[in-house]
Image: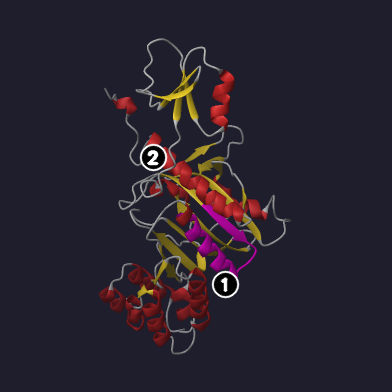
Amino acid sequence: MTKPTDILPIGLEDSLPASAARITAAMRACLDVLESHGYDRVRPPLLEFESSLASRMLGIETRKLFRFVDPASLRTLALRSDVTPQIGRIAATSMKDAARPLRLAYSGDTALIRASQLDPARERLQLGAELIGNDTIEAASEVVSLAIEGLHAAGLTGISVDFTLPDLIDTIAAQDRSLTPDTIEAIRRELDTKDAGGLKAAGGAAYLPLLYATGPFDVAMAKLRELDAGGVLATRLDALERIAHAVGDTARITLDPTERHGFEYQSWFGFTLYADDVRGSAGRGGTYRIGGSDEAATGFTLYLDKLADAAREPEAKPLCYLPLGHDRAAAARLREEGWRTVTQLGEGEDAAALGCTHVLERDGVREVS
């Protein structure tokens, strides 16, 4: 019987064995991909000083963080909502003298005070990589390709990547001195909501074509090229095409040049990852600047717990029951060969009920009948 004290808070849930196994297998597969490409894993702490988290990345809203006073220092601590700012701190402090470009990987839990209706989870297991000290097309291409390769390694299918240009409006508006900061912000807001009427009312009628320059990459790029008669975006668009060429046929590519949701700190390039049977996005990434050091970086984050239902089922290992008085050396050899074992602790146990497929006997292993 469930007691009121056994109920978890809204937005939090247990991962039971089957789900936890898929998450763990996906994590190992993705980390193996990152390691094979020269990314070294780091493990920042779950919590740190609130001021440190807020200073390393634009867009971090401390009011959304779980905060409390550290009894040791009497300073405010916060549970991280994103691991990326911590990687920025590591790069700017303890690894500031490491050779660049610096390639780091991570995996860890994050938490939010409140989440959105579309994505109500308040705890996320993030896995990602950051390429620090390089702001080139080659760096962006490497990071996007790695994210896609990681999803493939986890067994996901139907992968697509949606490119965006987070600073697009700033780049265009810089050429029009008649626009006030308030008007520019209003244009951003209406483009975010894809509201053509609101965009006109905000004084952004000239930006209406951007609402329709979305969809399959080649089609959307052709529309953007037509809109960019003055060549203001030429360098950006050339970069997107080169990144898309690097991705090739490993994923379907789309383009939504004005999308800003989830790109609070990205600079000139951002991308969102999707996959079959994954609700919402599977991950995000892009280019940014590390607060404090202003060093350029490119990275991505995958939401591992969201991938659990779509990730490949881990290979089932046989489970062998070890009766009282069993041969310990034989049991050790089974584990070395990849078996899982369960040791009998008392009379009356049922090997089959415990999930065992085999039993170790004096003359070898037999299947559970």
Which amino acid type is shown beneath numbered disc 1? Ile
Magenta stretch, residue numbers = 128-151
Q: Name the residue under label 1.
A: 137
Question: Camera-side residue: 64 or 13?
Answer: 13
- From the top left corner, tell me how far across and down residue 29 is, in percent: 51, 49
Question: Camera-side residue: 336 or 295?
Answer: 336
Q: Name the residue under label 2.
A: 19
Which residue is located at x 60 percent, y 54 percent? Answer: 36
Residue 136, magenta (yes or no):
yes
Report the mark closest to the observer, 2 or 1. Answer: 2
Q: What is the spatial separation of the Cα atoms under label 2 and label 1, in whole angstroms?
A: 37 Å
The colour mode here is secondary structure
- From the top left corner, tell me how far across and down residue 241 is, in percent: 49, 77
Question: Residue 218 appears in which quarter of the rendering?
Answer: bottom left
Q: Please, what is the dominant secondary structure of the magenta stretch?
A: helix
Please give left or right for residue 36 compared with residue 209 in the image: right
Q: Which structural element holds mark 1?
A: helix
Which amino acid type is shown beneath numbered disc 2? Ser
Residue 15 can be seen, yes or no: no
Which residue is located at x 55 percent, y 17 percent? Answer: 327
- From the top left corner, tell me how far across and down residue 43 is, in percent: 59, 44
How busy is the neighbourhood of tag 2: few (under 14 within 10 Å), some, or many (20 plus)?
A: some
Which residue is located at x 33 percent, y 27 percent? Answer: 6
Up-down relation of residue 149 to residue 309 (above or below): below
Q: Earlier in the sequence, mark 2 or mark 1?
A: 2
Residue 149, magenta (yes or no):
yes
Up-down relation of residue 23 to residue 258 (above or below): above
Residue 8 can be seen, yes or no: yes
- From the top left corner, tell me how far across and down residue 3 is, in percent: 29, 24
